[in-house]
Image (spheres, helix red, strand yellow):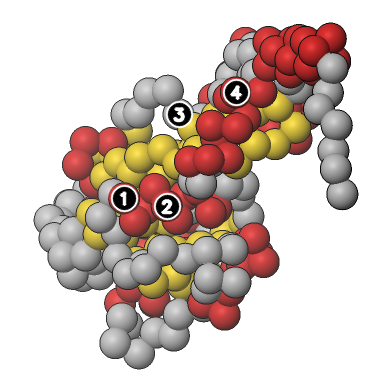
Amino acid sequence: MRFSPLPRFALVIVGAFLTLAGLVPLPYAVLQPGAGTDVLAKMITVKGATTYPTKGKLLLLTVLATSPNSPIFGANVLYSWAKGDSIVLPRSVVYPAQQTSKEINAVNKAEMDGSQTAAASAAFGYLSGVGTLIDPKKVNVSFSLKDTGGPSGGLIFSLGIVAKLSPVDFLAGRTIAGTGTIDANGFVGPIGGIDEKLIAAKRSGASVFLAPTTNCADVHHIPSGLTVYSVATLKEAISVLKEASTAVPHCTWQRNR
């Protein structure tokens, strides 16, 4: 079968169309793995109670997303796909429609503040449940972090508070990463971007990852060397870390699916 070459005029039209397509902003947002920051280093400060040293790290993970006002072009989309560790989603999936960047940032900050308050309540509740004498009215917990928003750090915040106030060092020298919302009763809820957070955890040196049980269906690839445990409560998360020799990893049925 013979194919006739396109006329030069047609080639010019196709070329112009492709060039124009690459210059027109597209309604997408790009998400990629961020970094892991140890909340025990300087992020969480506890005053008004005895604190204990720990050997290990608790990593708060971030996912980087293009801002709602950032233009995304065809070349950006192709580059993100080629990298393999980024995801391209419709902007409406990532950001609420009809909201400005200022409004979105305000919502993210409010969610972060709420997660910190809930994390402290959950931590105090857990400590009280295991017999650690803590008077929440006398204990002051403060957080220091910038340019991070949303509620997904709740579980790690709670673990950090418990680690500082518990005489038992359940980190045991390990680098632990995790994600999940938390409420005042210690229940862990789902988050977005879990695959990107798994990559961030691995790159940051973590060997253990705590994931919300409700996110297991969203895990599509677990990096080699990273063990994932699904947890539904703060109590479960601490039990997993304390009983490392007998704890059974979850979500692993989706490894390399």
Q: Quadrant of the C terminus?
A: bottom right
Mark 1 neighbour class, 10 Å CA radius: few under 14, some 14 to 19, many 20 or more: some
Q: Are marks 3 and 1 in contact (CB under 8 Å)?
A: no
**Which residue carries the number 2 mark?**
199
* Residue 67 image point, x, y percent: 58, 19
Q: Which residue is mark 4?
A: 75
Residue 77 position (above or below residue 104): below
Whether residue 69 is visible to the viewer of this picture, yes or no, is yes
Q: Are marks 4 and 1 in contact (CB under 8 Å)?
A: no
- Element on which disc 2 rests: helix
Q: Which residue is mark 3?
A: 148
Question: Looking at the image, is mark 3 or mark 1 earlier in the sequence?
Answer: 3
Hey, what amino acid is under mark 4? Answer: Ala
On the image, the x and y values in percent for residue 166 come to 24, 63
Mark 2 → mark 3, Cα distance in angstroms: 18 Å
Q: Nearer the viewer, residue 142 or 251?
A: 251
The image shows residue 25, relative to residue 255, as above or below, that is above
Expressed as whole percent of the image width and height from the top left, the position of residue 134 reads 32, 56
Q: Is residue 121 visible to us here?
A: no
